[in-house]
């Protein structure tokens, strides 16, 4: 993501609770989402929009990015949300588009934004059967799109399935594959039990192994654990440095490192890891 070194954690906080935005900004989350969508009842949408300016004015470090999750652009509230964002003196770093089902939703948002708000980038949540089917086209819709978020709750509801690893595996993999085609960040659905830290860590490790780069959160207490899982440790970075350095010595040819055959795919993966997370020499 060009405006953020990495995106390990995304914390959702309702716009109706501006006092919680300050806590979210201090939680360690890479992206704090000011949420106008699901947590806000239909009859309170207008009130949430009225509090948006207060939320966006919350003091926070430059490292923390603010996003606004609007309602679906297939609804009147979604269009009202965009208009409210345009009225703001301070704009968010990202607009998070929910329940995206086709690339036109992103293209239309980009056209509405125009060049005036060119610094505002997009995140898109894919969480319906139609969205999963069109994930590749969604991922390629705009250069302003910097990441996809997989939403398990709405997807499972649409499918009539449980929220389990097996039932969600296909959808998770589909969205992940689409994101990787265009080099987008891939952020997993939240772990919905805020008090089950062991479960959160296990779930985060699983999706990281799958290829996800981060995870959503519903509570500030989850952030430190998510960040730890998705931030490579010193040993991982050191091994990546060794892989790249030895590859250079071998002029890119395959070689053995501690008994493991290191070829082009592993060398490229090591270089990507260093490009993203290694701050030595910068």
Image (cartoon, rainbow, N blue to C red):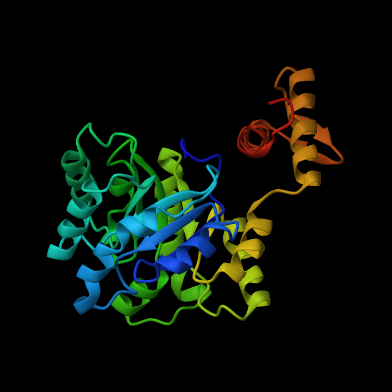
Determine the residue located farthest toward the right in the rendered image. 258
Q: Identify which residue, 82 or 261, lies in the foreground.
A: 82
Q: Identify which residue, 64 or 182, lies in the foreground.
A: 64
Q: Is residue 142 above or below residue 17?
A: above
The residue lying at 55 percent from left, 46 percent from top is 61
Position of the C terminus by quadrant:
top right
Image label count: 0
Q: Is residue 215 above or below residue 232?
A: below
The answer, for residue 59, to whether it is visible in the render is yes
> Is 197 on the left-hand or right-hand side of 166?
right
Q: Identify which residue, 110 or 135, lies in the foreground.
A: 110
Q: In which quarter of the view is residue 76 placed? A: bottom left
Q: Identify which residue, 107 or 58, lies in the foreground.
A: 58
Determine the residue located farthest toward the left in the rendered image. 76
In the image, residue 172 lies at what x, y percent?
45, 62
The residue lying at 61 percent from left, 81 percent from top is 195
> Is 228 on the left-hand or right-hand side of 38?
right
The residue lying at 53 percent from left, 71 percent from top is 219
Q: In which quarter of the view is residue 78 placed? A: bottom left
The answer, for residue 189, to whether it is visible in the render is no
In the image, residue 132 lies at what x, y percent?
32, 60
> Is 243 on the left-hand or right-hand side of 138?
right
The residue lying at 50 percent from left, 61 percent from top is 22
In the image, residue 25 lies at what x, y percent?
52, 57
In the image, residue 101 lies at what x, y percent?
24, 58
Q: Is residue 191 above or below residue 213?
A: below
């Amino acid at each position: 993501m060009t405006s953020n070194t990495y995106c390990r954690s995304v914390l959702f906080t309702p716009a109706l609770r501006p006092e919680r935005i300050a806590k979210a900004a201090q939680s360690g989350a890479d992206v704090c989402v000011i949420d106008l969508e699901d947590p806000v009842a239909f009859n309170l949408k207008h009130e949430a929009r009225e509090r948006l300016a207060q939320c966006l004015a919350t003091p926070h470090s430059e490292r923390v990015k603010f996003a606004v999750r609007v309602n679906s652009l297939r609804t009147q509230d979604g269009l009202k949300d965009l208009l409210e964002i345009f009225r703001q003196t301070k704009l968010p770093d990202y607009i998070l588009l929910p329940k995206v089902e086709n690339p036109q939703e992103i293209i239309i948002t980009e056209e509405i934004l125009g060049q005036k708000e060119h610094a505002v980038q997009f995140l898109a949540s894919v969480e319906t059967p139609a969205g999963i089917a069109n994930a590749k086209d969604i991922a390629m819709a705009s250069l302003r799109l910097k990441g996809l978020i997989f939403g398990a709750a709405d997807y499972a509801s649409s499918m009539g399935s449980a929220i389990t690893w097996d039932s969600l595996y296909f959808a998770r993999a589909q969205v992940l594959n689409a994101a990787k085609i265009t080099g987008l960040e891939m952020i997993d659905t939240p772990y919905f039990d805020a008090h089950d830290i062991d479960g959160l860590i296990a779930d985060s490790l699983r999706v990281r192994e799958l290829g996800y780069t981060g995870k959503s959160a519903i509570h500030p207490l989850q952030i430190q654990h998510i960040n730890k899982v998705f931030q490579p440790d010193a040993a991982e970075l050191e091994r990546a440095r060794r892989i790249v350095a030895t590859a250079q010595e071998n002029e890119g040819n395959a070689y053995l490192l501690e008994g493991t055959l290191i070829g082009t795919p592993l060398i490229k993966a090591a270089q990507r890891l260093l490009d993203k997370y290694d701050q030595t020499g910068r």
